[in-house]
Structure formats: structure tokens, C-alpha cells
Image (cartoon, coloured by chain):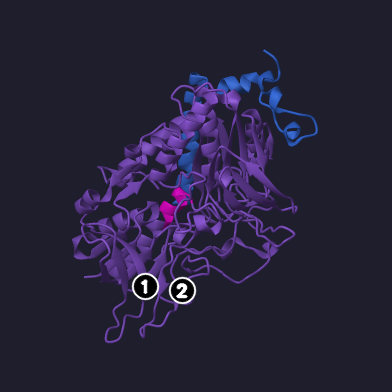
Amino acid sequence: MARVVVMGGGVSGHTAATFAKKWLGNEHEVVVVTPNSNWNWIPSNIWVGVGEMKKEEVVFPLAPVYEKAGIDYRQAKAVSIHPEGKEGSDQPFITIEYTGQGKEGQTEEISYDYLINATGPKLNFDATPGLGDGKGNLGPHTVSVCTADHAVHANNELRKVFEKAKQGQKQKIVVGTGHGMCTCQGAAFEYIFNCEFEAQKAGVRDMIDFHWISNESFLGDFGIGGLHLKRGGYAASSKLFAESLYVERGVDWTIGAHVSKVEEGKLHYEQLDGTEGEMEFDFAMLIPPFAGVGLKAYDKNGEDMTDKIFAPNGFLKVDADYTPKPYEEWKASDWPRTYQNPTYKNIFAVGIAFAPPHLISKPMKSPKGTPINPTPPRTGMPSGIIGKAVAHSVVDMIKEGSNAHLHEASMAEMGAACVASAGKSLTNGLAAALTVYPVVPDFEKYPGLGRDLDYTFGEIGLAGHWIKHILHHMFIYKAKLKPGWTLIPE
Amino acid sequence: MGSVDHSIEKNIRPYEPSFETMVPTPFVKFLRTCILWQIIRFIIINIKMILVVKKSHG
């Protein structure tokens, strides 16, 4: 009997674990280690953040789902990986520390035959002084929509702002990225336009100034270097469409910006052209930069070998080309295909947990040398596809031997379908429905634009909003493993 | 119906970034929330998304 251990129960890890168990049946074990008791459909957190959904609508308990699936669920955080075993035993294992199930604080070793790192991001609020509380949590000066609980708090604070606006006090809302190396510009985009939409509904729009601040060198970069959409006989840059929406909705912007410090009611920033400034706000939602969750790795003698399998950013090295090279020499083939660690063939990383070879957007820095450039997003669809492909590889290795053919899911050969909400309402909501193919541009295969225009498109409208709301229900249904769940594609 | 949506003119100022952008016409804005047209777009967008999903799953 083989044991597959999946660290993380988010989109990628949950997909990997549930498919692995389905394909392996009861003959082999699948263990999920995650510190969370709930699964969270993260794309809908922005709606919780503006009060259009309750927390209960975007989360559900994992324990009953895993019990139904026959998956061994440990509510714990993974602490370290021991791929070579320890003295007296060659059996690889991880160490975990429980966060629930009545064993809070207890540590344990869990052996594995195959390990999938799906730990996602550490929300690195403390990377920007004042953005965090100094202990790794969200600080007191801003809000966040990265977790369901953060989003509930964000809405509570937003409503206080609306109340002040109703009483005639002019308010300023700032939304964007809280560091020069953030990703998830799309989530911030959704949040600012949903806040603006809600302000209109509350009748206080005229009393609120909205301002966007991000590390993108142009609006519409989204961490993927932008994209081109066919419109009116032209292939037009996402910059044009993004700027159009910002102007239409009265949202000013500061871009190419690194937020260097946050204080009560004020942030400090530095821009690509060297400008340094301050921005006051009454309410701010700033996405934190991401890092790996901080897993350590030890060899058989107990010596630290973390940097042997993890990149400096804490993400796990996989089959990518990590050779440092300038932007002009980047290739689509730099990106991983199998997500297998090159040193330990029974370790894989999926979703946000794998170390990308480099950015997707062009690296840029200020005259002072501060890097100010979006880092690569790993959105739901690629994360799910990667999780499923790795599960398939692991299952094949178990059934056919360690030389089994590995399944491939390069982000330079897959697309993403994204829906960015700009306001929730059944009859006059809006969302930008986008597909981009491939996610990582391939300038050799598609010279000039890097993408296949036949499979890259976008439009904004009520239909996009209906699609986002349907996807919310559909993916929660799938994650709960309800009848026919495997028929819903990632 | 005018050729330009005048309601957003207050957001546009000459020689600022806002001046260089595209301005939706009133008809374009109307179509975004026109239920009948959006039902058609819903079908078309879903077809396009399914094609990308299919291509991505190999």
C-alpha cells in the first residue's frame, strides 16, 4: 500500500487529493494535511468583502468531505520535509503541528511514498512595514480580502466609510497592491470596482474618491504582461480596456508603484521613475506579497537542506529552468511541465507552491534599485489543472512504477478563463469575462503578441457576472464531491 | 442618442491619462446590461470558454 501525502487543501491541493483518491481507490492511502478546517472558494471573497455574500456562502468544512472520500484528513500545518528519512530509517516523512481536531500544538511525523506540496502562499503582510502587525498577520491600518475572515472585516470597515460619507464627510478609498512584488492584481481590480458599485448603490458615490495603486507598469498588466483582445477589427491591448473602465468609473490610478510603508490613514510609495510620495486614505485594501509558507527540509543526518529543494522565496523547485537570464532570453520552455522536484522524484509542487522560473511581466526597478514588477499569478484554472495532472502522475507512478510517464501541464501550453467582477447584481451587475491562451506568453510560437488570438478574448457585461456567480456554485459543488463532480472541468 | 456617453465626461481632462482612453458610447453601455443581448453573449462566452478549457486539458 502506498501513501500519498498532500500538504494543503486549497484549489490545487484539494483537486490533487480528491482525484488521487478516486483513481487509487481503497488500496492506497491519501492523506491531506492542512491547517484550515474549511475549504474556501477564494474568488468570491471579494463579494464577502463588500457585503454581497456571507462567509458561510464561500466556505465549507473539509472533514465531512474527506471522510466521504476516504481521505485521511489532518488539521495541521506542515513544518518540515525529510525526503531521506532519518537515522535508522530511509522512509521519507514530514513533520506536522496540529491546529485542530483536539490536538492543537501537538507534533507528529507522517511518512509518505509521494508528497505533493500544495501549501499555497504565505500572505507576507510584514514585507511592507505597517501592512502587517509584525507577527505575520494583517495589520490594523488596512483591510484584506485574501481570506473569508479578512473579507468579513473588510466589509465591516467599508460600511463605516459609507456611513461617514452619508453624513457628509468626504472619504478616500485606496485599493491595489501593497508591495512592489505583489501578484493578484485581478483580485484588487475586482474589489475596487465592487466597492465603487456598492458606493453607487448606497447613494454615496459622489462623496468618495477612489484611487488605485499597483506595481503594474501599465494598467491591465494583471501579472501576465497584459494581453490583447480582438475588438472592432483590431487586436487591442488590455491597457486600453482597463484604462477605459477606470476612467468610466472615475477611478484614478498610480502605477509602477512600490508601497514602502503603511501608517494610520497614510501610505508611502516609490515609483519606477523615482518619484516618492505619500497617499492619504480613509479605507485601504492592499494585497500583500506572497512567499512560500516557510517549510524547512532536512537530510538524513538532520542537517538543514532547505535551499536544496526550495527557492529563496520559499516555493519548491520543480522541473523549471531556473538559470538566471535577461527578459529578452526568456522562453516558454523555461516553465515547468511535470512539477516534479528534480532532486527527489517523489516530491511535486502544485498551484502557488511551485517556484516559477522567473516573472511573466518584464522585470523593472526604480532608480534606487527597488524591484517594482508583478509576480506571476496562479489562478484557479491553472492551479486545478496542475493539481489534477500531478495527481495523475503520482497515481501512475504507484500503479506502474517510478518510471511511469509523467503528465504535463505547462502554463505556457494552457489557457485560463477568468471572470473579474465589476459589480454584483442579477440585473445590472458587470464582470469582465476573459480567456487567455496561453497563460505564459510564447513569443516563439505566437510572435509579437505571445498569445493565440483565436483563444484569447474578453468582454465586459452582465453575462460575465452571471458566469462568475454560476462558477461560484459550480466549483463549490465540485469541491464537495457531489454527484458528477468529476464532470466539471478545472 | 448621442455618439458619446456624456455622463463620464467629468472624469476626462485634456492632456491627462484619462484623455487618451476609449470612451464607450451610450449604445455600448446599454448593451452591457441589456438582458436579451446578454443572454446571447452568455451563450457565446460559455462556448468560447469551453473551447479554451478543452484546449488546456489537452
Residue A106 placement (x, y as % from top left): 25, 66
> Where residue A121 appears, x then y in whole percent?
45, 57
Q: Is residue A115 left or right of residue A175?
A: left
Q: Could you give the CA–CA distance between mark 2 and mark 1, rounded to whole angstroms?
A: 10 Å
Residue closer to the observer: A372 or A207: A207
The image position of residue A247, as x and y in percent, is: 66, 31
Circle 2 residue: A309
Query: Label 2 lies in what chain?
Result: A
Question: Is residue A456 at least partly visible in the picture?
Answer: no
Part of the protein shown in magenta: A379-386
Colour purple belongs to chain: A
Q: Residue at x 53, y 69 (%)?
A: A312
Left or right placement of residue A478 versus residue A164 in this view: left
Q: Which residue is mark 1?
A: A81
Whether discs 2 and 1 lie on one chain: the answer is: yes
Q: Secondary structure at mark 1?
A: strand
